[in-house]
Image: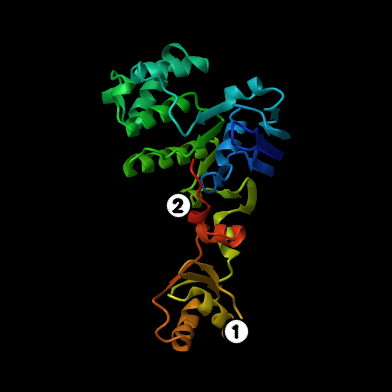
């Protein structure tokens, strides 16, 4: 059974003051199997957070349909919420309450009480290394510690569906590693996890990823499969004459590199054997040449036609 099914979702933000109406999602469709770790990967402004908020039942889309565990989250969002654990990109904890109080009140909202609630609170405090800060007001904590409280509160009730929007925001490397270890444990216990991210290494941890750009899914599949679509190695060339050199490479070798400023990029099988040919053909014109195996960033470029960094927009 699919835990999440999204069909033809469109969302438009209406015109506001001098800003025109904007279509944030354009005919988005995908499904997430039960027990799957699924990533929505893309640059800021690509539509990830809008889709996340729709799945979290914060608002309904302009058009399309979506179900979670067979329940219509648009027509009956209240029927979906008890099964969700939601971690938004920005904190929703109460800074005037202590760490423990935030967890206790969060647990009560999900129907936990008595010894069961106390046990779960203690477990989460220990897991996220918050026990020593349990009596501290959240407003006195660092950003990273507040993020840990947010995660502990949202996962307290052992939700079947976990939605995370850029979950590593504000976490130091050790806490980020702890987070992903915990997510893998939850997945092993049967939880379905859907996360948004702009970090390639987090995308690589997912069973499958949907690459979003300008409100559309431009690629969907297992990270290994998406990288295999590149069909060879990735060669990157830095030069002072990108336009001229691109045309000459095309004429000589029958392959047209992509140009990004002073950088040329091309995909080629057996790239290690092709690089000496380039160096010999254009002596003194190549400032640097590098060879790499395809990455998810290359998959984005392959399908979107532009670099991930060029696609980034202000949040």
Q: Is residue 227 visible?
A: yes
The x, y position of residue 112, in whole percent, is 49, 15
Which quarter shows the N terminus? Answer: top right
| Residue to which mark 1 is pinned | 251
How many C-alpha atoms fall within 10 Å of the one at disc 1: few (<14), some, or many (≥20)?
A: few
Seen in the image, is 4 located left or right of residue 98? right
Dot 2 and dot 1 residues touching (CB under 8 Å): no
Which badge, 2 or 1, is on the more N-terminal residue?
A: 2
Residue 201 is situated, as x and y percent measured from the top left of the image, at 45, 52
Is residue 300 shown above or below 185? below
**In what element is the residue under mark 1?**
helix
Horizontal side, residue 178 vs residue 194: left or right: left
- Is residue 1 visible to the viewer in this orientation of the structure? no
Residue 64, by quadrant, is top right
**Mark 2 element type:** helix
Decide if residue 252 is on the left or right side of residue 122: right
Task: Give the image location of residue 23, x and y in percent.
Answer: 66, 40
* Neighbour tally class for label 2: few under 14, some 14-19, many 20 plus, Cα within 10 Å: few
Q: Position of residue 210 (x, y in %)?
A: 60, 48
- Residue lying farthest to the top in this orientation: 114
Kindly identify the residue that appears in the image at 45 percent across and 38 percent down.
167
Q: 87 left or right of 100?
A: right
- Residue at 36% x, 20% y is 95
Q: Which residue is mark 2?
A: 201
In the rendered image, the residue lying farthest to the left is 132
Which corner quadrant of the image does residue 84 belong to?
Answer: top right
Q: Residue furthest front?
A: 18
């Amino acid at each position: 059974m699919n835990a999440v099914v999204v069909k033809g979702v469109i969302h438009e933000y209406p015109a506001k003051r001098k800003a025109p109406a904007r279509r944030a999602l354009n005919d988005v469709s995908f499904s997430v199997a039960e027990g799957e770790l699924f990533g929505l990967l893309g640059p800021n402004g690509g539509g990830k957070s809008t889709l996340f908020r729709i799945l979290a039942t914060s608002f309904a889309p302009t058009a399309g349909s979506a179900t979670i565990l067979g329940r219509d989250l648009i027509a009956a969002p209240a029927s979906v919420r008890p099964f969700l654990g939601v971690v938004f990109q920005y904190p929703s904890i109460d800074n005037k309450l202590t760490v423990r109080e935030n967890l206790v009140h969060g647990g009560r909202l999900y129907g936990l009480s008595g010894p069961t609630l106390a046990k779960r609170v203690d477990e989460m405090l220990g897991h996220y290394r918050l026990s020593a800060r349990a009596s501290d007001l959240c407003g006195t904590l660092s950003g990273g510690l507040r993020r840990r409280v947010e995660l502990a509160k949202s996962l307290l009730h052992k939700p079947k569906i976990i939605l995370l929007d850029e979950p590593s925001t504000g976490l130091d490397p050790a806490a980020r590693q702890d987070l992903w270890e915990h997510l893998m444990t939850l997945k092993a216990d049967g939880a379905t996890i859907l996360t948004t991210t702009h970090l390639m290494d987090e995308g690589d941890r997912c069973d499958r990823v949907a690459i979003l750009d300008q409100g559309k899914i431009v690629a969907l599949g297992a990270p290994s499969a998406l990288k295999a679509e590149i069909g060879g190695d990735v060669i990157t060339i830095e030069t002072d004459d990108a336009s001229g050199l691109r045309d000459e490479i095309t004429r000589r070798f029958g392959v047209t590199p992509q140009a990004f400023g002073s950088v040329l990029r091309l995909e080629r099988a057996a790239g290690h054997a092709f690089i000496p040919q380039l160096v010999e053909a254009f002596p003194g014109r190549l400032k640097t040449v590098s060879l790499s195996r395809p990455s998810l960033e290359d998959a984005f470029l392959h399908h979107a036609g532009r670099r991930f960094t060029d696609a980034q927009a202000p949040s």
